[in-house]
Amino acid sequence: MPRNSLRHHLYIIIFGSHTKAGRAFDLALIVAIVSSLIVLLLESIPSIRSVWGAQLKYLEYTFTALFTIEYILRLYCSPKPSAYAKSFYGVVDLLAILPTYLAFFFPSAAFMGVIRALRIMRIFRVLKLVRYLQDSNLLLRSLLMARRKIFIFFSTVAILVTIFGALIYVIEGPKNGFTSIPQSIYWAIVTITTVGYGDLIPQTALGKAIASVTMLLGYSILAVPTGIITAELNQEMNSHKSLVKCPNCSQSGHEADALYCKHCGSELADPDKRVVAEE
C-alpha cells in the first residue's frame, strides 16, 4: 500500500489511534456505538416505542448507515480485506448492521417474529467497544492462557454434577420431582453454583444430606476459576512490565508508559535514552 495513497491515510485514521484524526475517529465511533445501544434499549420499552417509535426507527437507520460506511471503509483500506472480514471484529461489525437489512428483505408478516429476534443481534455493537479498551486484550490473553486449566475445572464440575444428579435421582425419585437424570443434573448445577431456585427440593433425609454436601462443595470450588484467571492475569501483567531502570534509584518494573518512577518519584529517562535492566 503506497504511503501517500488515500487507502493508507484511511488505514492510519481507522485502524490507528496514535494520530489526532485517529483518536477523533475512535471517539466519534464510541459515541455512535453507545448512542445506538441507547436507541436499542429505548425501543424495547413499549411506552416509549408507542410514542417515539418512528423517530427511534429513523435513528436506527442512521446508525446502521454510519456503521455500514465504517465497515466498507475498513474493508477498503485494510491490507487484507478477507482477513479482516473473517476476524472476530469483522464478524462483529457485520452482525451489528446485518439485522436491519434483513428486515428490508423479509417484510412479510410470517417472518416478522424472526426479524425482531434478529434485530436483538444489534447488541453485538457493544463488542465493538472492546477494541477501544486497552486492558481488554490483556484480559483476553489471560483467559486464552488459562483455557486448559479452565477446561479441566469445568470438566471436573461436569463430572461432579452428573454424579450428584444421579445420586439424587436414585434417592428422591419421580415422586419428589426428580423425574429424570437430566432433571436431577439440572438440580445439581443449580445447587453446586449456590443459585438455589427452589423449584426442586429433596424431601428425604439422605437427599438433604447429599444437597448439603453439594452446597458446601459449591462454596469450595467457586474460588477455583477466579484463582486461575487471577494468576494468569498477574503473570500477563508482570510480563508487560517495563524493564526500564530509574536513573535515580536504579529500580525497574515500571509500567510500559510510565513517565515517573513508582519507587522514588523521579522522572524516567526519555525512551531513546533509557537503560534497560537485565532479565
Image (tube, rainbow, N blue to C red):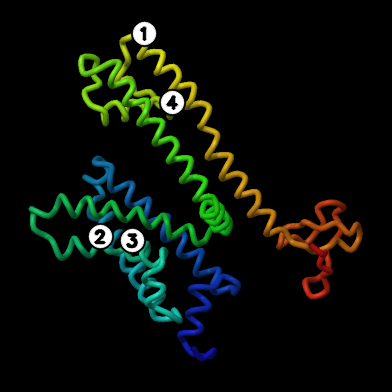
Local SS, label 2: helix
Location of residue 227 by image quarter: top right
Determine whether, in the image, residue 271 is placed left or right of residue 53.
Answer: right
Q: CA distance from mark 4 to mark 3?
A: 35 Å
Quadrant for the C terminus in the image: bottom right
Circle 1 residues within 10 Å: few <14, some 14–19, many ≥20: few
Residue in the picture at 32% in, 9% down = 204
Circle 4 residues within 10 Å: few <14, some 14–19, many ≥20: some
Local SS, label 1: helix
> In terms of sequence position, does the residue under pointer 1 or pointer 3 come before the other?
3
Residue in the picture at 12% in, 55% down = 111
Which numbered disc covers residue 248? none
User: Closer to the camera: disc 1 or disc 4?
Assistant: 1
Q: Amino acid at mark 2?
A: Pro
Q: Find disc 4 in the rendering and name its residue.
A: 194
Q: CA distance from mark 1 to mark 2?
A: 53 Å
Q: Find disc 2 in the rendering and name its residue.
A: 99
Q: Amino acid at mark 3?
A: Ala
Q: Find disc 1 in the rendering and name its residue.
A: 205
Determine whether, in the image, residue 217 is placed left or right of residue 277.
Answer: left
Q: Amino acid at mark 4?
A: Thr
> In terms of sequence position, does the residue under pointer 4 or pointer 2 come before the other?
2
